[in-house]
Amino acid sequence: MASFLSTIFLASAVAGLLGSLVGLGGGVLLVPLLTVGFELDFRLAVGTSIVSVIATSSGAAAAYLRDRLTNLRVGVLLELATTLGAVSGALLAPWVREEVLFVLFGFLLLLSLVPTAAKLGEEVPRDVRNDALAEWLRLASSYPDPATGRFIPYRITRVPLGMLMMYGAGVASGLLGIGSGALKVLAMDTAMRLPMKVSTATSNFMIGVTAAASAGIYFWRGDIPPLLAAPVALGVLAGATVGARLLAQLSNRAVRGVFVPVLGLVAVEMILRGVGRL
């Protein structure tokens, strides 16, 4: 038993490390790990992953806030659209076939890889001007870059498009029971043109709020086994804390280089999960 729990802890630490680096949370990596690698029941794996998402967000968000990478104004604004979308998705869920949605969202993520991959060499978005909403809400900010020893200013554009994409991310979260961190990072990185590290840090802050809202339901259903959730949460928390420290030291190019293959794996996983249920 001790060996099994130690293995779970180490695997969760790796998931938490990757999850915090790319702003997806550890859940998208933990669910296939627990179901395929440890042959855990799917419902229990999802419930346990919800706990891990909260642990990832808690561990990483505090460090990102301390490092001034998280844009709180953007996170709170976009959380309004995500929450509204999550409620819409939860209301729609009884009338939509889940397996079809998994396949559609998987292909959507694969298509989204194209513009993200095209910007692999971009360090900081150039020639970005604040749109009217970003100017009015004073969303533009700056973050300290340890590599250069100076603050990097950035501007934000196409806020309405970003909120629309966030609403879609919320719908996906409510329909599929996922954190939608991939869609949140894509909305901020490709639509609103935030620097990749700021997108990742702000996404980590947001997914914890979304996961906390649904964790109570999973706990009430008995889908969170305490004996398993404890080492998973501790492992993910340890990995997320290390990942948060690494992110501040990495360049935006390096973060995007990790994000693209991880997003590809998530997309393939969603397609396979949907096809497997057809």
Image (tube, grey):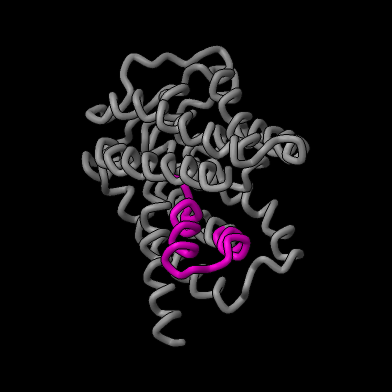
Query: Left of 162 or right of it: where is 209?
Result: right
Determine whether 156 is above or below 32 in the image. above
Please indicate whether residue 248 sits to the left or right of residue 210 in the image.
left
Q: Quadrant of residue 216?
A: bottom right
Front-most of residues 76 and 271 = 271
Question: Residue at coordinates 69% horizontally, 51% vertically from top-left?
Answer: 213
Image coordinates of residue 196 in percent, x first then y, are 37, 35
Report x, y in % for residue 89: 70, 36
Residue occupying the far front of the picture: 278
Judged from this view, the residue extending furthest toward the bottom is 2
**Eyeballing the image, is 90 above or below 140?**
below
Of the pair 164 and 65, the residue shown nearer to us: 164
Magenta-highlighted residues: 23-49
Instruction: Report the number of discs.
Output: 0
Q: Nearer the viewer, residue 95 or 125?
A: 95
Q: Main secondary structure of the magenta part?
A: helix
Measuring from the top left, give residue 218's x and y in whole percent: 70, 60
The question of residue 42 being in magenta is answered with: yes
User: In which quadrant of the rendered image does the C terminus lie?
Assistant: top right
The reply to whether the magenta stretch includes residue 267 is no
- Compared with 13, 100 (above or below) is above
| Residue 69 seen in the figure | no
Q: Quadrant of residue 6?
A: bottom left
Residue 257 in view of the camera: yes
Image-quadrant location for residue 206: top right
Q: What residue is shown at x 46% (from left), y 45% (from top)?
A: 272
Q: Position of residue 187 (x, y in %)?
A: 49, 28
